[in-house]
Amino acid sequence: MDTAAAGQKTARVPRGPGTAFPPVAESASPNIQDRLLRLEELFHVVSRSQQGYRELIDSMDDVMFSASLEGEIRAVNQRFAELAELPFRDLVGRNLESIIEEPTRETADRALARFVERRFWQGILRIRMRKTSGVRYFDCTLRGVVKDGKVVGVSGLARDVTYERESEARFTQLFETLHEGVYFSTPEGRLLDANPALVAMLGYENKDELLQENVNELYMNAEDRTGLLQEFDDQHTLREREIVLRRKDGKALICLDTSTAIRDTAGRVLRYQGTLVDITLRREMERRLHQEQEFARRLVESFPDMIVVMDREGKYTYVSARMKDQLGYEPEEILGKALGERTHVDDRKVLLELHRELMEGKRAYGTVEYRTLHKDGSWRTVRGTASALSDAGGNIIGVIASARDITDLKRLEQQVSQSERLAAMGQMMAGVAHELNNPLTAILGINDLLREKAPDEAMRRQLELIQKQARRAAEIVQNLLTFSRPRAPRRGQVRLDELVLHTIQLHEYSLHVNNIKVEYTVEPGVPPVLGDAHQLMQVFLNLIVNAEQAIREVDGEGKLSVRVEHRGAEVQVSIQDNGPGIPAGILPRIFDPFFTTKRPGRGTGLGLSICMAIMREHGGTIEARSLAEGGALFTLSFPAMNSDAQALPEPQAAQA
């Protein structure tokens, strides 16, 4: 045995690191040698498997560790070393307390007994590392390491959820502090969650009270909720849909709802979530603003004046509807046009100068009269008042102006001036008429004496002609006195046949000069009327003058037919001429004040309106129409007086 043993040679089998197998003798039996080789190969496989396992757990993002109940580290992965910021080789054997500041040892000891009993714990741990002092959150799963039925250690897997936890905290903070209402609800209408803003918007005391309400019951109109759910069938998100909710106190809450449907993989709706923006106050402000704007618009449109706004360059940015009434233009035709485009060339400079001074702040406001072109081609006189328009900062940004057509007012002023001259002339004519009465009386008296002593028939005929003409002159003088003498209104019995004849005689000379033949017809037995002879003479004279002016517009011999007749309970006076007639387009307007078709300076448009007013005061009517054969016919109707009617007393003169 010894010799044999001494003579044997030992063969070395290659071993890997950590191999603890003894060398195999060369004289060993083949079976043993083969078994040892297979065992060596198995060890290599296990070693490589352990190395792969180590590489696997080191590549994980989660933290893995194993420690004793006293906190001594037995194994960790590379992720643990990175968080601890310590070399991997320095961790095994160290106590966790030397690496982790929080939770403290006291906290861990209080939880250890419960963990040993259950051998399992899962939850979120707040960890503070001693080296970095940084706080991180981990979703941990801890299991007990059991040996011989006893827990001797703990192994753990921890996932870093710091980012998710911070995101959740930020979301919670945002959820709680948003001014917009945020909600989560089920398809059946159960509220899952709501932020404080929504609780306050709906007027509830707290969130728990609100969560007891069903969403469907919060809608003022149930159809809004139904329509919203139907829209979700076609799309996942609804943006700024206006809805009306019911507050706890029953008042309406107008909101803009932006919501999303959260679905599962099968497309079924799991919940609805969204935000609500309270626009109740905005809608109320919009309503009030609309009312104020409508009031301002109506106010501007009710002004008789044109209202315009111009920018710094003098271009119109706003024109009121009165532009159409006064100058014939639609407001859209004026917008964007420049100031002065339709102004008379002689007045344009002063208008533009006023705009420039207002824009430069040299004047706060100004008034100007100028001539501007009407759409029908006529020139109208306009009086404008303008002031500077400023923005919120006090900067002048334009001019606002009101303008009024004063063409008719100017004509009225001219008419008043003319009336004053005519009144003065009337007074002069009255004086002249009084002076003429004396020589006419003497002429008539001497003529009567001469006729008695006329030597022959020829002389007598000449004296009768003198007497006839002198009496005619006396009647004209008397008519002038009657028409020109100022007197208080007085109503009494008036024979229209005589009054119309006197009016024709008063205007006879002008009719004769203009080659106008007068046909005057009176029906026998015309009853008197109740009226003011002076006012009625003014009506007849105005109509005769109008007829004369109309006849002068046509060539040929003029003809004026005047007829007085009795028609039932009325006395009618008709005045007919053979002039051009009245166009159908203006016939309804001829009695309007200031309406005239005459050239400037030949009429004020007041004559027929005055006639209409006098006829109404006398209870009568006046009508006008054009005749098919040419010319115009005016018919005046007066109530006839009964035989027992008495004249009305004279009105008292107004006290100064």
Image (cartoon, rainbow, N blue to C red):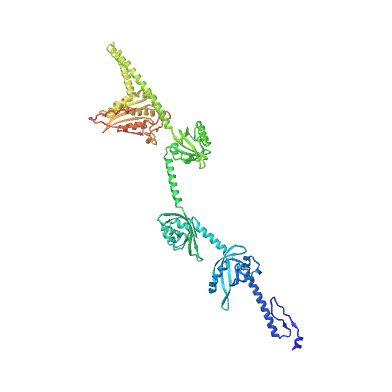
Residue found 64% across the figure and 74% down from its top: 50
Tally of marks: 0
Image coords of residue 107 (percent x, y)? 55, 68
Residue found 43% across the figure and 32% down from its top: 407
Classify 463 as above or below 13: above
Image coords of residue 562 (percent x, y)? 32, 28
Foreground of the two, 369 or 141? 141
Looking at the image, residue 126 sits to the left or right of residue 646; the answer is right
Classify 445 as above or below 371: above
Foreground of the two, 534 or 513? 534
Classify 16 as above or below 561: below
Specify the farthest residue to the left: 644
Residue found 35% across the figure and 31% down from its top: 610
Image quarter where the C terminus lies is: top left
Q: Is residue 378 visible?
A: no
Image coords of residue 357 (percent x, y)? 52, 34
Specify the farthest residue to the front: 106
Image quarter where the N terminus lies is: bottom right
Q: Residue 125 sits in which quadrant? A: bottom right
Looking at the image, residue 566 sits to the left or right of residue 264; the answer is left
Q: Is residue 172 visible?
A: yes
Foreground of the two, 186 or 485? 186
Foreground of the two, 276 or 100? 100
Specify the farthest residue to the bottom: 1
Looking at the image, residue 493 sits to the left or right of residue 13; the answer is left
Image coords of residue 213 (percent x, y)? 42, 61
